[in-house]
Amino acid sequence: METVFEFVDIDKSENLEAFTEKKLEKLENKYDWIVRANIYFKHDENQKPNGYITEVRLSAPGPEIFAQSNENSYEASIAETVRDLDRQCEKRKAKMSSH
């Protein structure tokens, strides 16, 4: 799976990229049909109380899979986003195998 990171109005972080790739690796191992992941990190002071936003778009057969989380740290935001993506991928897998 190809991963593309974008940091919107924040500094690039190698540690954040490594943590995210480790979390996404679990999805890649479970769902081999995922082609690409676009990951966006944003910090928005107006999004109270949290403001640490992670968005992930997965390219896979069928419509794009998207999840977003707004938590009190990027690590928590990534973890929540990956949990959402896992649920969506599980549903997609069930649809794919039923046809």
Image (cartoon, rainbow, N blue to C red):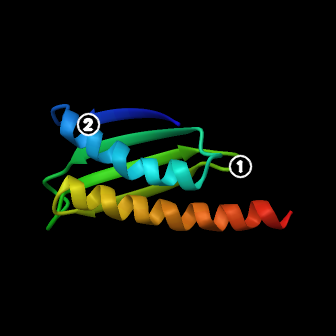
Q: Which residue is mark 1?
A: 62
* For discs 2 and 1, the disc positioned in front in the rendered view: 1
Please, is residue 83 above or below residue 14 in the view? below
Residue in the picture at 15% in, 32% down:
11
* Front in this rendered view, residue 4 or 31: 31
The amino acid type found where label 1 is placed reads: Gly
Residue density around tag 1, few if under 14, some if 14–19, many if 20 or more, within 10 Å = few
Q: Residue at x 59, y 60 (%)?
A: 89
Tell me, for residue 29, which label it has, or none: none
Residue receiving disc 2:
8
As measured in the structure, the alpha-carbon distance from the residue carrying label 2 to the one carrying label 1 is: 27 Å
Judge by depth and name the residue closer to the eye, 18 or 10: 18
Question: Given the current orientation, which residue lies at the most extreme right position?
Answer: 99
Q: Nearer the viewer, residue 78 or 44?
A: 78
Q: Position of residue 31 (x, y in %)?
A: 60, 53
Q: Within 10 angstroms of label 2, few (less than 14), some, or many (20 or more) residues? A: few
Residue 20 visible in the picture = yes
Total marks placed: 2
Residue 12 horizontal/vertical position (percent): 20, 31
Regarding mark 2 in the picture, which secondary structure is present there?
A: strand
Is mark 2 in CB contact (under 8 Å) with mark 1?
A: no
Q: Residue furthest front?
A: 29
Tell me the quarter of the image containing the C terminus: bottom right
Looking at the image, which residue is at 60% across and 45% down? 34
Q: Is residue 86 above or below residue 59?
A: below
In the visual, does 95 lie left or right of 71? right
Kind of residue indicated by mark 2 = Val
